[in-house]
Amino acid sequence: MGSCFSAESRSPPCNSPNSSSFRKRKSNSKKRLGSRASSFEYWRNEPLHRIPGRIFLNGSSQVASLFTQQGKKGTNQDAMVVWENFCSREDTIFCGVFDGHGPYGHMVAKRVRDSLPLKLNAHWEQSASGEEVLKEISVNTAGSMNSEEAAFASADDESRVSVDAEETEKHPEIFQTLKESFLKAFKVMDRELKMHQSIDCFCSGTTAVTLVKQGRDLIIGNVGDSRAVLGTREKDNSLVAIQLTVDLKPNLPAEEERIRKCKGRVFALQDEPEVARVWLPNNDSPGLAMARAFGDFCLKDFGLISVPEVSYRRVTEKDEFVVMATDGIWDVLSNKEVVDIVAAAPRRALAARALVESAVRSWRYKYPTSKVDDCAVVCLFLDSDSDSHKVCSASNVIKSKEQPSSGIQVHNGDSGDVPAPTGLARSGTCRENNEDNNNNSEEESKEEEIDTDAEIEWSALEGVSRVNTLLNLPRFEPDKEDKGMRKHK
């Protein structure tokens, strides 16, 4: 996580009488959802915080539990969302967790949280109906293809090649449709960020681990190093963890090869040899600790891409829940520890909060001189039982006030106010033992919305104190090259 500025550039509030979008929505408010195109227009114009079944603050519903907490590195740059009956589709849920980094990482994460589901829905509808409903969201995306776009196209082609006859027989049609929709939506989302007028994404970006559940089908799209893990039962009824995504780090062989082919550099610093980072060709910056991300356009010409890894799983009666979380969780807790904590929560409504609180305790115990990272968790429960069903034995009582089980519950989190601008601290330089627990309440829901249109299982680092995702911002000086640069193959 990098430091952030405190102010966000916003358009007039979406519900303000002076807002053009307000007037447009008012005139279109009586439009019915008769066609796919009108459905897209409806969801695009509807204020997100007013959509039934969409949760993006700390809270819970009958099928999900959400919780985020600010760390000690500045403003909370994590975001999350659960959208039940996704765009009026019955038995369909969209979930996402986003981990921002850089000066405007909090804004990028929120923007992707709010816009990506709509783009995914639009491409999904287009694939299903063949109608052209994406003209407006694709505006200004034309132009010459640079190396970043070429890398995206290459990865896109590789993804398409993977959809062979064997995979088609193994996976249902919805996976093929949604895989294409994920690829297109992520591409359009990244292009939109590049041209965004009020969010500077040059050295800021976000991860995204997203999931669509329709019936018993799970389709996961992942960019970055956030993670999704499944809690399931074996034949002896023991609970096991199955990692559903790959942490897309720069030291993965395929990722490193692509970055080097694009003239980017991958190496770790001496004081953190376990953390591989992406660097510009002729500048020791920015040192991004992931190989794929939204934004971060300073590196998009040098191997960083925003193409998602898309995977599929058919839910069985043994599968109990999916945990999606940012690296603030995975850096201090193993997959097995995470599923055990969620299963030990006395009620589903408390599962996400219990996991975040356990992670914070682990941070303070394992790395007392390090700053606790932001944490965001979405727990999606896969069975159809009501929330009154206990996840496990109540012997493990969470010291939290239990919430009612019916409907959607939203409560205040522990995120604090946005601090004043600070420098991007280099990893390992902060040594704080006394941590301040005076955190303010979550921002109001309207303020949260960003106005403006290989078989090897790779896991997060363990036993290493978490460092900043982004080390420092590049400085470009014309007609002057950096001297004394380290040379790496």
Image (tube, grey):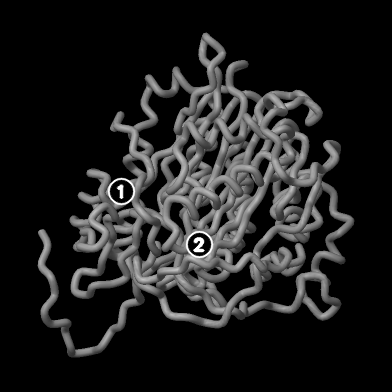
Query: What secondary structure is found at the residue carrying circle 2?
Result: strand
| Residue highlighted by disc 2 | 100
Relative image position of residue 209 (x, y in whole percent): 51, 46
Amino acid type, callout 1: Ser
For the point 53% across and 72% down, the residue is 196
Along the polypeptide, which appears first: circle 1 or circle 2? 2
Vertical comparison of 173 with 362: above or below: above
Q: Looking at the rendering, which quadrant does residue 355 occupy? A: top right
For the question of whether residue 426 can be seen, the reply is yes
The one of 44 and 211 positioned closer to us in this rendering: 211
Callout 2 crowding tier (Cα within 10 Å): few <14, some 14–19, many ≥20: many
Please state the horizontal and vertical placement of residue 314, each as a whole percent of the image. Answer: 54, 22
C-alpha gap between disc 1 and disc 2: 26 Å
Of residues 183 and 229, the one drawn nearer to the viewer in this rendering: 229
Q: Position of residue 170 (x, y in %)?
A: 45, 19
Judge depth for marks 1 and 2 and give the one in front. 2
**Where is mark 1, residue-wise?**
154
- Of residues 212 and 248, the one nearer the viewer is 248
Q: Secondary structure at mark 1?
A: helix
Circle 1: is it few (<14), some (14-19), or many (20+) Cα within 10 Å?
few
| Image quadrant where residue 350 sits | top right
Q: Which mark is residue 98?
A: none
Left or right: 468, with 40 as reference point? left
Q: Residue at x 52, y 74 (%)?
A: 4
Of the residues shown, which amino acid type is indicated by label 2?
Answer: Gly
